[in-house]
Image (spheres, grey):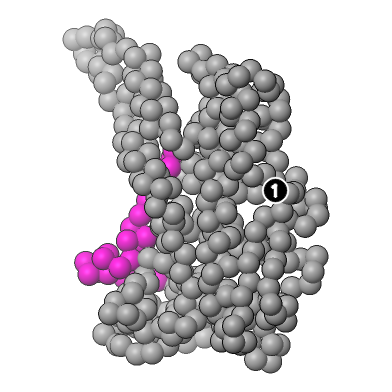
Amino acid sequence: MKIFRAAPLNWHYISEIHIGLIDGIFCKHLRKKLGFHRQMFDDDFARLFRSNNRRSGSLFNIKSNDEAVVQKLLGNAETHSKDEKIRELVEEIAQLLIWLGRAYYFVYDNTEQEKVHLTSINSGGVARIFGKHIQWVPKRTEKRWDQDDEELSREIRILDGAKVIRFDMPRSIKSMLSAQNKTLALIDKYHFKATDFQPHATHENPTPTNHFDFGVWNDTQETAFYRATISTGWNGRKYDSLKRSDFFDCHRLIRFRRNQLLLRDDILNQLSVELSRIGKGYTAGFSVEISGTEKLPSVAHLDELAVRLDREQVGFNEVIDYFYKG
């Protein structure tokens, strides 16, 4: 095993990884397999922004005491593309948080172009031990087309903490997703097990009677699904259930979108804090604050919609239209 100071290794460039028992402690993501419902939820929940807002004007307010450093941290993005840069970064962070609960980025300085690149490093191999950020790299094989493959030993890379950016899932959302995902994992595990209860035909009984009630089986799974997703408001892309009313669907849409906006706003707050910290390395006292503009939907308006829906003062179409805004 090698232990040395270095920049983090980009997992995308590793040809073949050899996972040992000890590697699983730091690299759980390499063994983590998502079920059907969990994968679908992660995809839906990570869509914090809607495509119809890509060209609707400024989406973010950026307040800073040094515009030049802001430009540097955003890769010298032009004014019209700052929104797109922040939007893509927030969505990428959200995907990592939903999957792993934590996201790490590393700051690379491009001195020639006077730019700063924020690059995602796989959170599964990064840890903070005794005040130091390390990256655990398992044994791997580097395949090269012009020479023999190279077998590389396990590594512990000590990272420059000043260049490491860490994002955490808010505790309330993390707890909510943990409870939901446990049930979703069980539903995925037994989703297609109903066929196991079908009696097998034999020579003595070629047409056995099937006493298994598939209707009860499906109802049980559906009930478990809706109970598990009460807090998140996710509907599982189900639009044909007889158990649901329009009120049920609208309240779920509001709850689901509200959780998304809470995550979006928390990521923007963490991003402001971390960029301010990194920016102080270029200008003393640097600070930046990034927030959404009125072009984006807000938690306050969703709360108002929920109250008006309870009082029957708003139509279903207005709720649905606002759900797909921003």
Apparent side of residue 51 relative to residue 239 in the rendered image (left or right): right
Image location of residue 224, percent across then percent down = 36, 27
Image location of residue 1, percent across then percent down = 26, 85
Is residue 50 in view?
A: no
Where does label 1 land, which residue? 296
> Which residue is at 49% across, 81% downward?
163
Question: From the viewer's perspective, is residue 121 above or below residue 218?
Answer: below
Depth order, front residue of 197/89: 89
Apparent side of residue 182 relative to residue 67 in the rendered image (left or right): left
Depth order, front residue of 63/3: 63
> Which residue is at 59% across, 83% downward?
285
Residue 14 falls in image quadrant: bottom left
Is residue 179 in view?
A: yes
Tell me if residue 150 is in the magenta stretch.
no
> Which residue is at 64% across, 63% downward?
290
Residue 124 falls in image quadrant: bottom left
Apparent side of residue 118 relative to residue 192 in the rendered image (left or right): right
Q: Which residues are magenta?
A: 16-38
